Amino acid sequence: MKKNLLALGLAVCMAASLAGCGGNKAAETTADATTEASSTTETSAEKESENTGDGAESTEAAAAEVQTVAAGKLTVATSPDFAPYEFYAIGEDGTPALAGFDLALAQYIADDLGLELEVVTVDFDGVLSELQTKSVDLGMAGLSPDPKREGIMDFSDLYYMGGQSLVTVKANADTYNTFESINKSDVSVGAQIGSIQMDLAVVNSPDADIIPLPKVTDIIAELLAGKLDAAYIETDVAKSYQKNYPELEIVMEVPYDQEGSAIGVCKGNASLLAAVNASIAKALEDGSMEKFIAEANELASGEKYEGLLDESGQVQQ
Ligand code: ARG
């Protein structure tokens, strides 16, 4: 599996999406979810507050109870081809740096647990296999809580609400704008390998020439190059590319019954799952998640790295 070697095919721009998803897309905290989540931390938090009354210490107590693949670290797999969830933003010093609200939430959870954040970058199907082999603690990659994945990971509560779309280019928007119109053997339809978009392609356009690609940025590049006629893409991600590449056209919403993003948690690690859910509930409650989404959208509207990174995360010459 190729790690740290990610082609970001295209830059992304999210400026106008700020209004659209800068805050209103964070998953809603229901009273139930909050109660449930806070009861999971009760033991450690209460124990600590009885002893010291110090909130910071209680998170360390929670971390002490949580087993991770590398002691003292929270190891998180992600696939940074997916702005505003995760992508490479070009920093002020001109170097690409991982960005996105998934990464901000990962840091929040790590801080909450008193653990050091370690991020592993892989293609999306790699996020699934890293979890399956229990090589990482968490997978944070705009993961849909697909019941078919429950054998290889546990799912946290939802932290973001997104949707699915069928995308083509403006020039073809009148031709490929229904399931029927793309469900033909001479119509090429892209989807990311391992993703639920792949399932959507198979279910909704079984007769099409379905082209699996490793990165969403590859899919966008192929659409723009005319090598793909249409593609199934997460709506907010499609919108972000559309800002930079206005020739892209979102032609229709695609129904999907497991909407929203969850964190994939290493299977069977109940204490980590409980701690992650408690952190998510807190991030939704205290406004952090909204802030992470707004910041990610703003960063995604700036300059992004489009090339490859070498093994050490440096720009390849
Ligand atoms: N939500 C979709 C899924 O879970 C796609 C996620 C792709 N994520 C990424 N970082 N490329 O299958």
Image (spheres, helix red, strand yellow):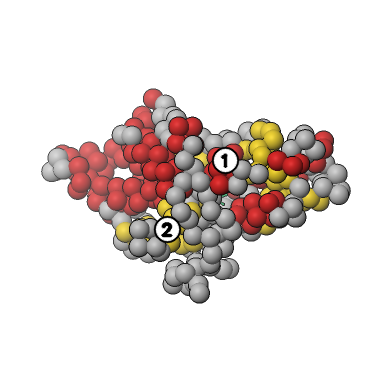
Taking the image as drawn, is residue 280 in sight? no
Q: Choose between 31 and 250: the one closer to the eye.
A: 250
* Residue located beneath label 2 in the image: 90
Provide the secondary structure element on which disc 2 rests: strand
Provide the secondary structure element on which disc 1 rests: helix
Within 10 angstroms of label 2, few (less than 14), some, or many (20 or more) residues?
some
Within 10 angstroms of label 1, few (less than 14), some, or many (20 or more) residues?
many
Q: Is residue 298 depicted above or below 214 in this figure?
A: above
Residue furthest out toward the left: 52
Q: Choose between 268 and 215: the one closer to the eye.
A: 215
Residue furthest out toward the top: 31
* Residue located beneath label 1 in the image: 239
Taking the image as drawn, is residue 308 in sight? yes
Residue at point 57%, 55% (across, down): 10
Number of marks present in the image shown: 2
Indicate yes or no: mark 2 CB to ligand 1 under 8 Å: no
Residue at point 42%, 53% (across, down): 99
Q: Is residue 266 depicted above or below 44 in this figure?
A: below
Whole-angstrom CA distance, mark 1 to mark 2, is 20 Å
Which kind of residue does numbered mark 2 sit on? Ile
How far across and down, in percent of the image, does residue 13 sit? 51, 46
Residue at point 35%, 51% (across, down): 107
Which image quadrant for residue 290? top left
